[in-house]
Image (cartoon, helix red, strand yellow):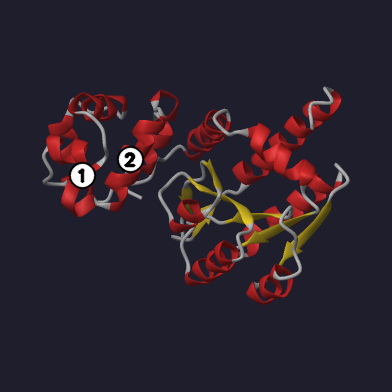
Amino acid sequence: MLLDERLNNNFEKLNDNDIQIAHYVNTHIRECKTMKIQELAARTHASNASIHRFTKKLGFDGYSDFKSYLKFETEHPSQLPSDSIDQFKQEISNTFSYLERVDYHLITDKIYHADTIYLYGTGLAQMNVAQEARRILLTIHKNVIVLHDIHEFKMILNKSTNKDIFFIISLSGESQQLTEITNYLQVRQKYFFSITTLKDNNLAQKANYNIYVSSNTFYLTDGTDYSSFISYHIFFETVLRKYHERMVQQNFT
């Protein structure tokens, strides 16, 4: 998405309203290139001042400078930063910043009361995250199952209980298969969490609760794209620690 790098570099300055504005802009780039500030404010249920502050937080001189950036970048895609280590460090920092906003009380409650926890990753790397998450969650003596495809989803949906929860792990949160899976979950009123990168996506919109992490695409010298999933592992490691804290405090009811 066009603003991802700017968002990641200035994440700690942003509030929830800023993120919603960014979501709208990223999904309406063509319109926003010529949109007046009053119209963007109305579309995002924000004030003109909020839009102006948002653009300043991202390093622009103001809204006009922001629109110029949208126009230029869509016609001349920017080069990725040459210092990939600094970018990597920023991803980790941004992930921890966002995870501070996560409702761990809700997540750990759902885990505590769950009969079974189901994990699903949308690709090979995402499935590796699911397998590692299973290892982590098994340490708290829960029944944890990794689902490998949509056929396994169909098999367990009618057998799962109302207490069961699902974690859906995806990079983009967009695919035809995900649409089918989320439709099944919603029809059967199953509670599910989405874990995706920080951008507006269908999976996050449909989930009962969504978790965002930071993961930029890194391009190798031969043009191959590579995305790190360390931020996803950080989330599950954090959940384990939050769960353990509540167990020590005997804070579950």
The residue to which callout 2 is attached is: 22
Give, as a three-letter code, the residue at label 2.
Answer: Ala
Q: Does residue 148 appear in the picture of this structure?
A: no
Quarter of the figure with the C terminus: top right
Placement of 205 over or under 87, stated as above or below? below
What separation in Å lies between label 1 and label 2 (alpha carbons)? 12 Å
**Label at residue 98:** none
Give, as a three-letter code, the residue at label 1.
Answer: Leu
Q: Does residue 154 appear in the picture of this structure?
A: yes
Mark 1 residue crowding within 10 angstroms, few (<14) / some (14–19) / many (20+): many
Q: Hey, which quadrant is residue 149 in on the image?
A: bottom right
Residue 247 on image: x %, y %: 83, 29
Which one is closest to the eye, mark 1 or mark 2?
A: 2
**Label at residue 70:** 1
Q: Residue at x 82, y 22 (%)?
A: 249
Q: Residue at x 17, y 51 (%)?
A: 31
